[in-house]
Image (cartoon, rainbow, N blue to C red):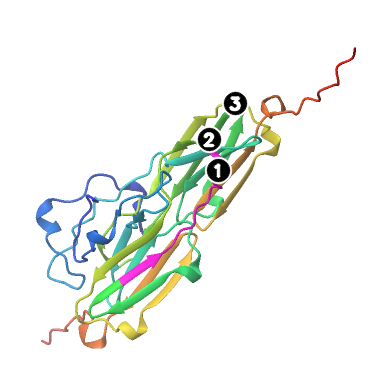
Amino acid sequence: MLTRSFLTGRPMSSGIEQMERLFDHLVGPAVGAGAPRFAAPALNIAEDHETYVVEAELPGLTLDEVEVFVANDELTIRGTRTIETPENTRTLRRERAAGAFERTITLPGAVETDAVEASLRDGVLTVRLPKAAALRPRRIEIRPATA
Amino acid sequence: MSTTNDLKTRCDDDACGCAPTSSRRAAWTYRPHTDVIDAADAVTLSLDLPGVDSSQIGIDYEAGMLSIQAPAPARFSPDVKMLRQEYGVGGFHRRFALEDGFDVDRIDATYRDGVLTVVLPKSAGAQRRRIPVAG
């Protein structure tokens, strides 16, 4: 088995890009070194009053291939995507990124580390981080003025 | 557009990267990253389609053109405040020109963990064969 984890580099020379047909057996494999990598996955981060939500698109990854760590206000997402190329095949095009990735971000504020939840569904990782109690808005009771 | 090879498949680039109509780029259409693997009996396309409902994936073949599209619903409520947005979420669309030699009635597709796998069986006459040399 050949995995893509070890492949790096840029796509091949532009001379081959002119070939546009899917079923042309006359041109040899041209994309061998072109596997993109995602060393640091792109993130979308949102917040509401109670929670930070961090999302990453990690298509092809299963639960056991992703790890999520949280400490204080730091979140780390790491994992490895392995794309296996079956034997006796030729790679005509390789655009999907593979390899190990890791990214650590600092959240704008502290979170309740015990209450952090992560889910992975259809290639989308979603981490929900409840804000630390001190950061959550609290309704302050207004007492009637005493005369 | 992508700097990756357009070897042997032709993507309809005009169908991608449509103008955004919202700041969250939900109206963009994205061109999914695709691997194309050629085996003796079939060509397999693997497309990264994260966040898609498999029942919403459309795969159409007409006149030599294989068209794959899927909407990707917004995942953040409009009420939240975006702190960082490093990628857009929108539908996916990509087209591939197929030459003759595929058995298009037997095209098979599966969606798992955000990856769509489309198997294009080669018709019998088009399969690679090793010709034995007598002697």
Disc 3 marks a residue whose amino acid type is Gly
Disc 2 marks a residue whose amino acid type is Thr
Whichever of labels 3 and 1 marks the residue nearer the N terminus, that label is 1
Secondary structure type for disc 2: strand
Q: Position of residue A16 (x, y in %)?
A: 12, 58
Q: Is residue A67 visible?
A: yes
Q: Is residue A85 visible?
A: no
Q: Which residue is mark 2?
A: A76
Where does the magenta region start and end?
Answer: B67-81
Spatial CA distance of label 3 from label 1 is 21 Å
Disc 1 marks a residue whose amino acid type is Glu
Residue shown at 50% from the left, 31% from the top: A105
Q: Residues within 10 Å of mark 3 (few under 14, many from 20)?
A: few
Q: Which residue is mark 1?
A: A67
Q: Position of residue B56 (x, y in %)?
A: 47, 69
Q: In this picture, is A135 found above or below B103?
A: above
In this rendering, the label closer to the viewer, 3 or 1: 3
B23 lies left or right of B126: right
Chief SS of the magenta region: loop
Residue shown at 33% from the left, 47% from the top: A6
Residue B75 sits inside the magenta stretch: yes
Whichever of labels 3 and 2 marks the residue nearer the N terminus, that label is 2
Q: Which residue is mark 3?
A: A109
Residue A115 sits inside the magenta stretch: no
Q: In this picture, is A52 found above or below B92?
A: above
Residue shown at 37% from the left, 60% from the top: B92
Residue shown at 53% from the left, 35% from the top: A76
Chain letter of the residue beneath label 1 in the structure image: A
Chain letter of the residue beneath label 3 in the structure image: A
Residue B114 or residue A94, whichever sits in front = B114
